[in-house]
Image: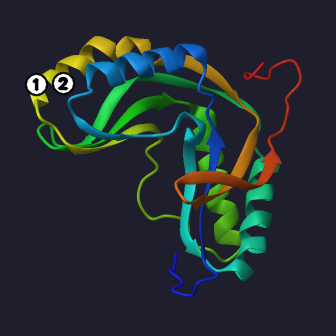
Amino acid sequence: MAEYPDMKARRLFAGVAVAATEDLRRAWTDLRRELQSERIRWTRPENLHLTVEFFGATAEETIPTLANALAAAAGASPAFALRLAGLGTFGGARHPRVLWIGVDSPGLAALHARAADALRAAGRSPEARAFAPHLTLGRIDRLNDPAAFAAALETQRGRFAEEQAVRELILYESASGRYVPIGAWPLQVVSNSDPAT
C-alpha cells in the first residue's frame, strides 16, 4: 500500500483482539522476570492482537473503502476459535528481533484470505508477504545471554497455550503506542456448530 506523507494519514491495520487472560498474564509475568536482564520492549497487555492485514500510513479519504471491504470479509466469515501455542522468535538464534506466541487457527487464515479478496475487489492491494499469524510479546533490542534466553523459552513454552473465541474483525489505529479500535464488524455466528462457543 502506498505511504502518504501528509499529516492526515493514519497508521492502520485490521486484526482480532486477544484477551490477556489471568493465565496468560501469569505466564507472561514469569517470563519477564526470567528475562529481566535482557533488553526487551514488552507489548502492553491491552495491545494484544493478531494482525489480519497491515495498511500502514493511510489517507483519511480511503478509510471508508477499507471499512467496506473489512465489513464484507467479516460478514462472510464464521466466528472461530484460535489456539495460542508455544513461544518463538523472528531473526537468528543469536540475534532474534521479535518474541512471539504461536497461533494455530484455520479460522484466522480463512478470515485473512477473505479480507485480502475483499480488498482486491475494492481496488486495494493487500500485503504481499505471506501471512504468518503470531502474537507479539516483545521486541528484542539486544540479548546479553542468548543461551539463557533460549533455555527460558524452552522452559516456559508450554505455559503459553490456551484457546480463545474470535467474534469480530477490528480496524485499529496505531497512535502514541496504543492500538485504538476505530471500527469493528461481527463475524457470522453459526448455530449448533459454532467452534467459538
Residue 159: where, in percent of width, then height? 42, 12
**Residue 50 at x, y percent in the picture:** 55, 42
Picture quarter with the C terminus: top right
Q: Amino acid at mark 2?
A: Ala
- Residue at x 32% of width, y 20% of height: 33
Q: Residue furthest bottom?
A: 6
In the rendered image of this protein, does residue 181 appear above or below residue 104? Answer: below
Q: Amino acid at mark 1?
A: Ala
**In the displayed structure, would residue 50 be above or below residue 182?**
above
Q: Which mark is residue 147?
A: 1
Q: Which mark is residue 150?
A: 2
Left or right position of 98 against 14:
left
SS class, disc 1: helix
Quick one: 190 or 62, which is closer to the camera?
62
Tell me which corner region of the image, top left, top right, bottom left or bottom right, holds residue 71: bottom right
Indicate the colouring scheme. rainbow
Q: Position of residue 47 (x, y in %)?
A: 57, 42
Label 1 to label 2: alpha-carbon separation: 5 Å
Between 6 and 176, the residue placed more toward the observer is 176
